[in-house]
C-alpha cells in the first residue's frame, strides 16, 4: 500500500509540475516554428495545450465551425486577475460604448484595453498563424517579464486563424508537393499554387471583403463574437508579394471622413513602435503608401468604424513564399523570417496599447459618446421604404448583424435627400418603412453603410468606392438632416394559409418570390406566370405574378404551395376562376407555363475567376438553395449537354471557347433550346462570335493640347482618368421583359470596368445606360464620359434557346442584394 501511494504521489507531483509548464510551440510540435507548415488542427491543439497549462491566463472559446467543419476559436489571454473577471471586463467595455442594456455605470479606471489579433484571413498568407503560436507562448511564458507587465493593462484576444479551410487548402497542398528539402527557386512547383488557391474560404469568398456584409459563415459567427467585445485595437495579419518589405500602420489615403484624428494619431504611435524593433534588427518596412481606409468590409476599416484602431499588417511572402524563396535582390526569405516579423509587430502592438491604455480607453469612450450624440455626420436620420416588406427584411438583417439600432417613425411629415431622384423632397411612404438614427452607439457604421455618397479624397484606392445600402438593396430611401423620433420596430406580418380548390396567385416583387418559385419547381409543381399585368377581383397584379392552378398539378398542390409561401413569407391569394377582369385569362397562351425544375450547370476550374465562380456557387448552394452542377471548363469538349437546361459561364477566359468544335457545340446547345448565362469576361469572350460589339473610345475624340507632355513625377496618376474602382450607375431596366420582372424600370449597378456594349439589333437590351447615369463613387473623367448609350444586361434568342448577358456582375460578393432576383429571373424566367 505504502509503495503504491508513493508511486501515486510521484505521478501526481510530476503531473502538477507539468501542468504549470507552458510548452513552447517547438516542444509541442516537434519542429521550430517556420521550418514546416502547421496544419490547422495542430494550431488548435497547441492553443488547447497552453490553455490547459495556464488556465488562469488563457481562456478559449469556440465561436463556430467553417463550411468544412473546422473549428473557429479565440483565445483570451490576460493576467490572472483579468482572466478571473473576464466577463465583467467585457460587459464594462460594452457599457463604455453604450451598447449594453445593463444600467451599471461604466468604469474607466482600471479597465484594460482589449487588443484583438486576427491571423490568416487569407489562407495562403500562412505565416501569420505560425506567428500566432509564438505570440501565445510569449504571452504565457512565465519567464517573460515584459509580456507579464503588458498584460496588466490589456486583454489580448487571439484568433489564430480566421479562415481555416483556406489555410489547410494551402498547407495540405504545399506539404504534398515539397520534397525532403524545400526548394527556394521561385520557379519550382512548390511556389505556384493550383486554382482556386487558399486565399478564399470554401466558397471562394474573400473573407477580407466580407466583414460588414457577413455573407459567409466564418464572418457571421466571428462578427457575432466581435460585437460582444468591441476591442480598442484590432490587427489583421496578411502577406503580400515576397519581394515587398513589411507594411504596417499608418495607412494610406484615401481615409473615410469619419476616421478621427485620434485614430490616425494612434496608428502612427503604433507604427513608430513597430519601426523601432524593425530598425534594431535592420528589417525593411514601409508605411502610408498603400492600403487605404475606405471600403467598410475589411479587417482594418470595420474595426475603425466600430471605435477601434484597426490596422492591416503585411509581410512579404504569400503563397509563392514557400518555406523559403530567393527574392529578386538575391536574398532568401524564409518562413521563419516571415513568422518572426509578424510575431514582432504583434507584441509591439500589445506593448504600445498597454503603455497607452488609459488614453485608449478614454478615447474609445469619447468615440461612442460622440456617436450617441449624433456628431458623426450631416444626416441625422435615414429612412428606407418599400412596398414589399421582404425588400426591407434583408436591410434589417444587415443592420442587426452590425449592431445598428433601427425603428419606425410616428410622424412621416419631413423632407430629406431622396436617393433615387437625387433631390430634397417630402417623404413618400411606399407602405413599409424603417428608420435609422445617427444618435446611437453604432452611428459611424450606420453612416458609412447608409450615406448616399462616400467622399473619396484620393481615388488611388484598391477597392470599390460606392456601396450605399439603398442602391445595393434596391430600396427607396431618404437621408434627413433632422433628428426624427423613432418608435418601436414592426413585426413581420405572418402569412395566412389559403385553401383553394382552383388556384393561387403569388405576387412576384422580391427575391423571396424567386426562391419560392425554385422550391415549387423542385416539388414538381407546374407554375404559370403572367407576362402582362392583369386585374382580378378588383385588384391589380404586376407582371411576373405566379399562378398555381389545380389543373395539371399533383393532388397536394395546395398544401405544397402554401407551405412554400409560409417559408418565404409571401401571402398567396385565392383564385376561383380562370376568368380575369382585365388582361389575359389564366388559360391564355400568353400566360407562360414553367414545368419541371431546370437543371443548372456552371463552368468552373482554372479558366474562370475563382471569386466569380464562388459567387455563383454560393448563391445556388446557400441563398437560392437550388441544385447546381459544377463542371470543369477543361471538360467542356467532352461534356454531354443533353440533360442540361441552363449553363452559367462566370467571369474568366475559357480556352475551349476559342476551339471551333466546342464553340459550335455550345451554339447547338442553345439552338436546341438550351440557355446560357454569361457574366462579365465571359460576355466579352462570347461577344465577337455571337454578334455583340463592345463600345470603344471614339477615334475622333480630339486629344487635349500637349496631352503627350506628361510630368514624370505624376506618372502614377495618369491612369486615373480611365479607372473606375467600383462606382454606382443607374441602369434603365426594361421591366416588361421577364429578366426585369419584379423590378421598377431602373436598376443600380456596380460598375467596375469601362465595358459597355452597343445596343443589340436582334436581341433585347434589357439593362442599358443612357446619359448621365453615374450616381456615386469614383469614375475617371474619360471612363465616365464613355459610359453612356449602351447595353449591360441583354437577352438574345437563338433557335429555340436563349443567351443572357450580364456584363456587370449582379452577384458581386453576394452583398449586392438587389442583383439576386435578376439572376434568378435569368435562370427561371428569361427565354421561356
Ligand atoms: Zn491578405
Image (cartoon, rainbow, N blue to C red):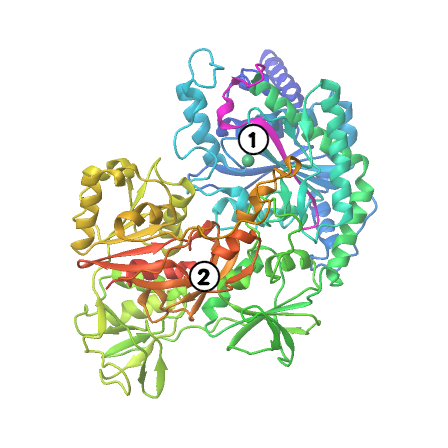
**Horizontal arrangement in the rendering, residue 312 relative to residue 579 (left or right):** right
Q: What percent of the width, then of the height, locates residue 442?
A: 67, 57
Local SS, label 1: strand
Q: What percent of the width, then of the height, locates residue 329?
A: 58, 17
Whichever of callouts 2 and 1 sits on the residue coming sooner in the sequence is: 1
Residue indicated by mark 1:
240
Q: Is residue 507 visible?
A: yes
Over which residues does the magenta segment extend?
306-331
Magenta highlight on residue 242: no
Image point (65%, 78%), residue name: 414
Q: Is residue 723 visible?
A: no
Image point (66%, 68%), residue name: 381
- Whether the residue carrying mark 1 lies under 8 Å from ligand 1 is answered with yes
Magenta highlight on residue 317: yes
**Horizontal arrangement in the rendering, residue 602 relative to residue 95 (left or right):** left
- How far is disc 2 from disc 1 in space, using C-alphas? 33 Å
Amino acid at each position: 500500500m505504502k509503495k503504491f501511494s508513493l508511486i501515486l504521489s510521484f505521478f501526481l507531483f510530476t503531473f502538477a509540475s507539468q501542468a504549470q509548464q507552458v510548452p513552447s510551440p517547438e516542444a509541442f510540435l516537434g519542429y521550430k516554428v517556420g521550418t514546416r507548415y502547421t496544419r490547422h488542427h495542430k494550431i488548435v491543439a497547441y492553443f488547447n495545450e497552453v490553455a490547459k497549462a495556464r488556465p488562469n491566463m488563457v481562456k478559449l472559446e469556440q465561436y463556430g465551425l467553417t463550411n468544412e467543419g473546422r473549428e473557429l476559436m479565440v483565445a483570451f489571454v490576460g493576467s490572472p486577475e483579468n482572466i478571473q473577471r473576464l466577463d465583467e471586463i467585457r460587459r464594462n467595455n460594452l457599457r463604455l460604448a453604450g451598447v449594453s442594456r445593463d444600467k451599471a455605470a461604466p468604469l474607466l479606471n482600471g479597465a484594460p484595453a482589449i487588443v484583438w489579433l486576427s491571423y490568416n484571413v487569407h489562407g495562403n498568407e500562412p505565416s501569420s498563424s505560425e506567428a500566432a503560436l509564438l505570440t501565445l507562448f510569449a504571452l504565457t511564458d512565465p519567464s517573460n517579464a515584459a509580456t507579464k507587465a503588458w498584460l496588466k493593462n490589456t486583454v489580448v484576444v487571439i484568433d489564430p486563424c480566421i479562415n481555416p479551410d483556406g489555410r489547410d487548402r494551402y498547407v495540405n497542398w504545399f506539404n504534398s508537393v515539397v520534397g525532403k528539402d524545400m526548394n527556394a527557386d521561385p520557379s519550382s512547383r512548390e511556389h505556384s499554387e493550383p486554382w482556386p488557391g487558399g486565399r478564399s474560404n470554401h466558397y471562394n469568398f474573400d473573407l477580407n471583403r466580407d466583414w460588414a456584409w457577413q455573407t459567409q459563415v466564418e464572418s457571421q459567427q466571428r462578427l457575432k463574437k466581435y460585437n460582444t467585445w468591441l476591442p480598442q485595437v484590432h490587427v489583421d495579419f496578411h502577406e503580400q508579394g515576397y519581394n515587398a518589405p513589411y507594411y504596417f500602420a499608418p495607412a494610406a489615403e484615401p481615409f473615410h471622413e469619419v476616421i478621427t484624428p485620434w485614430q490616425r494619431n494612434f496608428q502612427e504611435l503604433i507604427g513608430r513602435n513597430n519601426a523601432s524593433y524593425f530598425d534594431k534588427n535592420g528589417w525593411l518596412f514601409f508605411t502610408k503608401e498603400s492600403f487605404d481606409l475606405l471600403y467598410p468590409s475589411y479587417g482594418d476599416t470595420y474595426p475603425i468604424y466600430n471605435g477601434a484602431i484597426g490596422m492591416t499588417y503585411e509581410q512579404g511572402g504569400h503563397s509563392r513564399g514557400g518555406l523559403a524563396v530567393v527574392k529578386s535582390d538575391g536574398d532568401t526569405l524564409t518562413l521563419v523570417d516571415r513568422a518572426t516579423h509578424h510575431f514582432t509587430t504583434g507584441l509591439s502592438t500589445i506593448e504600445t496599447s498597454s503603455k497607452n491604455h488609459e488614453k485608449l480607453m478614454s478615447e474609445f469612450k469619447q468615440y461612442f459618446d460622440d456617436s450617441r450624440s449624433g456628431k458623426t455626420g450631416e444626416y441625422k436620420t435615414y429612412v428606407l421604404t418599400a412596398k414589399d416588406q421582404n425588400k426591407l427584411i434583408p436591410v434589417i438583417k444587415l443592420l442587426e448583424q452590425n449592431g445598428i439600432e433601427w425603428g419606425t417613425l410616428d410622424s412621416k411629415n419631413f423632407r430629406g435627400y431622396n436617393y433615387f431622384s437625387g433631390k430634397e423632397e417630402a417623404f413618400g411612404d411606399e407602405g413599409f418603412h424603417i428608420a435609422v438614427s445617427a444618435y446611437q452607439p453604432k452611428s459611424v457604421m450606420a453612416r458609412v453603410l447608409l450615406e448616399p455618397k462616400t467622399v473619396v479624397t484620393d481615388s488611388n484606392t484598391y477597392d470599390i468606392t460606392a456601396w450605399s445600402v439603398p442602391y445595393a438593396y434596391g430600396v427607396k430611401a431618404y437621408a434627413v438632416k433632422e433628428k426624427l423620433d423613432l418608435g418601436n420596430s414592426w413585426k413581420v406580418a405572418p402569412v395566412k394559409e389559403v385553401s383553394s380548390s382552383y388556384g393561387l396567385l403569388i405576387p412576384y416583387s422580391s427575391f423571396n418570390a424567386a426562391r419560392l418559385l425554385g422550391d415549387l419547381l423542385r416539388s414538381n409543381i407546374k407554375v404559370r406566370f403572367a407576362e402582362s399585368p392583369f386585374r382580378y377581383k378588383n385588384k391589380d397584379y404586376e407582371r411576373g405574378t405566379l399562378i398555381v392552378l389545380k389543373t395539371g398539378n399533383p393532388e397536394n398542390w395546395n398544401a405544397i404551395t402554401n407551405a412554400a409561401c409560409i417559408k418565404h413569407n409571401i401571402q398567396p391569394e385565392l383564385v376561383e376562376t380562370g376568368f380575369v377582369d382585365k388582361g389575359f385569362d389564366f388559360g391564355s397562351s400568353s400566360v407562360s407555363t414553367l414545368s419541371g425544375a431546370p437543371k443548372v450547370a456552371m463552368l468552373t476550374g482554372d479558366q474562370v475567376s475563382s471569386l466569380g465562380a464562388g459567387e455563383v456557387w454560393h448563391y445556388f448552394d446557400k441563398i437560392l438553395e437550388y441544385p447546381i452542377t459544377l463542371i470543369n471548363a477543361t471538360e467542356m469538349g467532352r461534356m454531354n449537354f443533353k440533360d442540361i437546361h441552363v449553363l452559367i459561364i462566370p467571369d474568366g477566359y475559357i480556352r475551349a471557347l476559342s476551339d471551333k468544335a466546342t464553340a459550335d457545340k455550345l451554339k447547338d446547345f442553345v439552338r436546341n433550346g438550351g440557355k446560357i448565362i454569361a457574366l462579365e469576361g465571359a460576355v466579352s469572350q462570347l461577344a465577337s462570335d455571337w454578334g455583340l460589339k463592345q463600345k470603344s473610345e471614339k477615334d475622333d475624340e480630339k486629344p487635349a493640347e500637349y496631352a503627350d507632355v506628361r510630368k514624370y513625377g505624376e506618372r502614377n496618376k495618369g491612369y486615373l482618368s480611365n479607372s473606375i474602382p467600383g462606382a454606382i450607375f443607374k441602369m434603365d431596366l426594361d421591366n416588361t421583359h421577364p429578366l426585369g420582372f419584379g423590378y421598377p424600370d431602373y436598376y443600380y449597378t456596380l460598375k467596375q470596368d469601362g465595358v459597355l456594349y452597343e445596343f443589340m439589333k436582334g436581341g433585347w437590351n434589357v439593362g442599358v445606360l443612357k446619359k448621365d447615369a453615374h450616381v456615386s463613387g469614383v469614375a475617371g473623367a474619360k471612363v465616365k464620359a464613355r459610359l453612356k448609350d449602351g447595353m449591360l444586361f441583354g437577352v438574345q434568342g437563338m433557335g429555340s434557346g436563349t443567351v443572357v448577358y450580364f456584363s456587370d456582375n449582379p452577384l458581386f460578393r453576394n452583398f449586392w442584394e438587389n442583383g439576386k432576383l435578376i439572376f434568378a429571373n435569368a435562370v427561371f424566367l428569361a427565354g421561356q
